[in-house]
Image: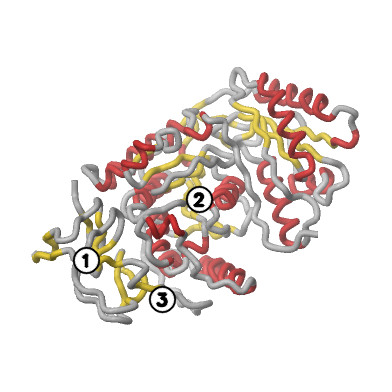
Amino acid sequence: MREFIKIHPEDSVAVALKVLEKGTEVQIDGRSLILREEIPEGHKFALQNIAAGEQVFKYGNSIGTAREEILPGAWVHIHNVKTGLGEVLDYTFAPRELRMEKTEDACFQGYRRTNGKAGVRNEIWIIPTVGCVNSVAQAVEKKARKYVRGSVEAVAAFPHPYGCSQMGEDQEHTRQILADFVNHPNAGGVLVLGLGCENSNIEELKKYIGPHDGDRVKFLVAQEWEDEVEEAVKLVEELAEYAGQFQREPISVSELVIGMKCGGSDGLSGITANPAVGGFSDMLISKGGTTILTEVPEMFGAETLLMNRCRNEELFHQTVNLINDFKNYFTSHHQTIYENPSPGNKKGGITTLEDKSLGCTQKSGSAPVSGVLSYGEPVRAKGLNLLSAPGNDLVASTALAASGAHIVLFTTGRGTPFASPVPTVKISSNTRLFEKKSNWIDFNCGTAAEESALEEVSEQLFSYVLQVASGQKVKAEEAGFHDMAIFKQGVTL
């Protein structure tokens, strides 16, 4: 196993792939270097003298500036490096010529819906219009689990606290996200459960849902029934009968939409798991498929790398707005735009937001940016898409699913048990986490720091994702987890 890695020839730091003791002699770039202190796994050490105020380079890009002089072999982290990020910036389009060669098609076993869309699950979803009926929705889910049989794979309620006492964009976002899930092809049947007096009532929500199949989507207003749970369970029985008619069949991966997200990252995330997902993304796109990258605040510091991959200038300007709108969101709440990384990230070796962002955007691979999506907007363009959503794990993963992701790939160096409305594949950046939390983690990319090449790991991940798309349950599904969170920005009445 390698003990450390210098990611880019121009880097002024290397990353420890295991704990390196003080006094360890390392050979790098044809010379010897003595470590001045212990370097934890995933953390950085200086390869050269870095003067105070000088930029520190990792991934071939600046991850901040030195707070003080850093000597060769010294630990490089938050105590001696600070962010170089500022506020809203002006950007210039400097397009890169990118070519994505087409590769041979592949198939998964999915569900073909009557509207032509493809799904990877055949579940019955219970969507509350308002938080007031969350308990009712959960009671219905519990009583209706008896209908999980045949090709019906789950009955799941998605409680949330919104749908009333909201204004402006918050109210619009709630309605759009709920409508997105009503229309999601992973649901073979949907029960929309309303209260009756809420702002986002069923009749209002229907305007966002649009044309729909009455056999697939049922509606119930709780205030109109003596026993709303009993009536709802009857409707779920009808939905299960309808959904049970669908069977898996071969579907081209060109119809697959995969969301990409990271959380609880460590110093290995940008070296193993994230680039492995980037390799997966390139493979899927080369076969005509679609990926979505989100968590905009974790693009800060690496945004120009994405901007210059835009297919055209219009997409470039949309990406600029994507970035600057989120920066303005931070400053409008009197918050600094670089209040990141989290304590867990720092403990794992991530020093600044630039460090985190450059590792985070590795998930995008090398494909051109083909689309830029607003929050709640369904994906339309094949290829790599950028989605407006925050870095919060559950909010961002929900947003990916709402925009049409069949599956979310979630890379992590710390581990997390959460789920989203669609299968959420937990991908570890290190083998230790994979072995310790086998009840959480589905796929290990830690081997990329050991004996396996990144390309090989990406190919293994691609095969695994096709298995999940074809029905193999991920750990969160086996645990029965289904979570959802809607982005809230404004006033609650």
Sequence order check: which comes first, mark 1 or mark 2?
A: 1
Q: Which residue is drawn at 72% across and 61% down?
A: 169
Relative side of 193 to 340, left or right: right
Tell me the amino acid under the disc marked 1.
Pro
Relative side of 410 to 15, left or right: right
**Image quadrant where one finds the C terminus:** bottom right
Sequence order check: which comes first, mark 3 or mark 1?
A: 1
Residue for badge 1: 9
- Mark 1 vs mark 2: in front: 1
Distance between mark 2 and mark 3 Cα atoms: 35 Å
Classify mark 2: residues with Cα within 10 Å, few (<14), some (14-19) or many (20+): some
Q: Mark on residue 84?
A: 3
- Mark 2 vs mark 3: in front: 3
Q: Residue at x 53, y 51 (%)?
A: 393
Sequence order check: which comes first, mark 2 or mark 3?
A: 3
Task: Give the secondary structure at mark 1.
Answer: loop
Q: Residue at x 43, y 34 (%)?
A: 466
Distance between mark 3 and mark 1 Cα atoms: 21 Å
Q: Residue 367, how many percent across, how many down? A: 40, 56
Relative side of 66 to 341, left or right: left
Distance between mark 1 and mark 2 Cα atoms: 33 Å
Q: Which residue is drawn at 77% across and 34% down?
A: 136
Q: Residue 140, how many percent across, how many down? A: 74, 28
Relative to 153, residue 172 above or below: below
Tell me the amino acid under the disc marked 3.
Gly
Residue for badge 2: 382
